[in-house]
Amino acid sequence: MERLLYISQTPHLENIRAACEAGCRWIQLRVKQSRSKTGVQPEDDAQWVKDLLYNQQLELAIDAKKICDEFGAKLSINDKPAIASQVNAYGVHVGKLDVPVVAARSIVGTQSCLGGTANTLDDVLAHIRDGVDYVGVGPFRFTTTKENLSPILGLEGYRQLMTVIGNKVPVIAIGGILLEDIPALKETGVYGVAVSGLITNTIDKKEMIQKIKAIWNH
């Protein structure tokens, strides 16, 4: 499992290709698609609306998988284990309010890299019991890329969690992480970091990714 995970932002395919070209080898397709973009009202729960959103995400996942395969990168799908299974993705990641870990595992099988979102020690221990391969723990600090943000952990929060978690499961730190944060996060014992805007908004993505990888290889 890679130490650096890039979480996609719109335009997803363009940003995924840019991250892959720059050297990132683990990508998570994270589509938080508003129903208003489909021309229907958010309160409309018609099945055709759900199918439309699903099919749009499936098409994105198929194209994202092609890009990742081109560069030898691993693709994980956020929230949608069925889509991950359909496109034969490397893995799937489920949030706290998404499909339960056990249900996701039953869909994607034992060979898939399954991760779950955690904010507290109880979250992490529950995910371990349910058989995740890693946990995405955060947020490190405030970030605008995620709605309904859980309580901020900060560096001390990771230190406290890692003293208990230890080597029980790989921990990926996530949430507003900057390059200068990574050395201190590494010292807490986390396995790696997940970033989004840090790569998306950087002009020289290759240099940024090289710097992040160098910290983990040091």
Image: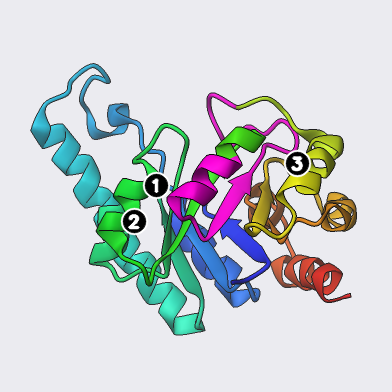
Quadrant in the picture for residue 5: bottom right
Query: Which residues lie in the magenta part?
Result: 124-149
Is residue 139 on the magenta stretch? yes
Q: What element carries label 3?
A: helix
Is residue 109 on the magenta stretch? no
Question: Residue under circle 2?
Answer: 105
From mark 2 to mark 1, how far is it between C-alphas?
6 Å
User: Would you say the residues marked 2 and 1 are in contact, meaning their CB atoms lie under 8 Å apart?
Assistant: yes
The residue shown at (22%, 28%) is: 39
Q: Which of 58 and 190 is in front in this view?
A: 190
Q: Residues within 10 Å of mark 3 (few under 14, many from 20)?
A: many
| Type of the residue with mark 2 | Arg
Q: What element carries label 2?
A: helix
Question: Residue under circle 3?
Answer: 161
| Type of the residue with mark 3 | Leu
**Any mark on residue 101, and which?**
1
Residue 13 appearing in the image: yes
| Type of the residue with mark 1 | Val
* Residue 128, image x, y percentages: 53, 50
The number of callouts visible is: 3
Q: Tell me which numbered mark, 1 or 3, is placed earlier along the sequence.
A: 1
Q: Residue furthest top?
A: 43
Image quadrant occupied by the C terminus: bottom right
* Residue 150, image x, y percentages: 61, 27
The residue shown at (48%, 73%) is: 74
Q: Residues within 10 Å of mark 2 (few under 14, many from 20)?
A: many
* Residue 147, image x, y percentages: 53, 28
